[in-house]
Amino acid sequence: MPTTAPTSPAPADVTSSDSSLRRFLHGLPGVDAVGLEARAAALGTRSIKTTAKAYAIDLAISMVDLTTLEGADTPGKVRALGAKAVHPDPTDRTTPTTAAVCVYPDMVAAAKEAVAGSGVKVASVATAFPAGRAALDVKLADVRDAVAAGADEIDMVIDRGAFLSGRYLKVYDEIVAVKEACGTSARLKVIFETGELSTYDNIRRASWLGMLAGADFIKTSTGKVAVNATPANTLLMLEAVRDFRAQTGVQVGVKPAGGIRTTKDAVKFLVLVNETAGEDWLDNHWFRFGASSLLNDLLMQRQKLATGRYSGPDYVTVD
């Protein structure tokens, strides 16, 4: 199935007008949905040996963005989550730290304090997460506040209404503006909410649009809708970042989020990464899991490999 974008003009030409951007995005190869889903399913059947599984579990732990995005979040809850990110298993200090803690902008300062000196990043959702229904100046203020409080990463949502109505340049300009508001200190993850984009063709177009606009990561979902990360939509996005680097030399990360709950799920996604984008993406600088319940299962499976005993849910903290 074709995955590579057509030979393209310079990005400045592609993004010079709504019509040129539309021509480029609609000139991308159509997605063979049956082939995409069949390949994702086939890769999901791969089995790995015990030693490889131990490596995969530690790698997956190191890729988790430990997340709390609830109206009832408190500084105390965020500090507890930060402590867990730094020492996921307090009984075993060989356990890797997670990649990041992800919180709302007003909780960034508490998260930053909780992970200080650990190497764990603080990510913050912004731009009127999760719906993105706000004026651009409000979204940019949201981003600047989070960065000023110490956020290392910003997770923004695109305007799905603009995208679905074909106003691609509006979406592009908004991503560019948010990227500028991140400054030089924060990386930008662009969330598409793939469950609302309806088609694989739209997911491919959104992937290229986000990358052209300067995204450091492209991310499937907010975790707040019925359909979130799936092997098929993540495979499609991995193909996009692979092809984008082949054409531009720029590497972009991928973050599936929502619905990934078990070690078995995580291993399937790591196989997708290795077989599609390649080993360069098998690092938390380029691949993340947007999940919280996943971490507990990874910890339980890690403990089982080490001791031969399955400890059950009481072995880990409830987030």
Image (cartoon, helix red, strand yellow):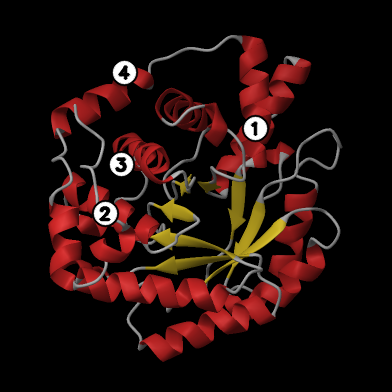
Q: Nearer the viewer, residue 287 or 292?
A: 287
Amino acid type at image mark 2: Gly
Amino acid type of the residue tagged 4 in the rendering: Ala
Crowding near pointer 3: few (<14 within 10 Å), some, many (20+)?
many
At 74% across and 59% down in the image, what residue appears? 82
In the foreground, 9 or 104: 9
Q: CA distance from mark 2 to mark 4?
A: 22 Å
Residue 240 drawn above or below residue 163: above
On the image, which quarter does residue 225 sit in?
A: bottom left
Q: Residues within 10 Å of mark 2 (few under 14, many from 20)?
A: many
Instruction: Please tell me the numbered disc located at residue 59.
Output: 1
Query: What quarter of the picture does the C terminus occupy?
Result: bottom right
Residue 167 position in % (x across, y down): 18, 72
Q: SS of the residue at dot 3?
A: helix
Q: Are marks 4 and 3 in contact (CB under 8 Å)?
A: no
Q: Secondary structure at mark 4?
A: helix
In this orientation, does residue 161 appear?
Answer: no
Mark 4, residue position = 42
Residue at the location (60% across, 62% down)? 102
- Label 1 secondary element: helix
Q: Assign the N terminus to one quadrant of the image.
A: top left
Sequence-first tag of 1 and 4 = 4
Residue at (38, 64) in percent of width and height:
213
Q: Which residue is mark 3?
A: 233
| Left or right side of 140 for 40 | left
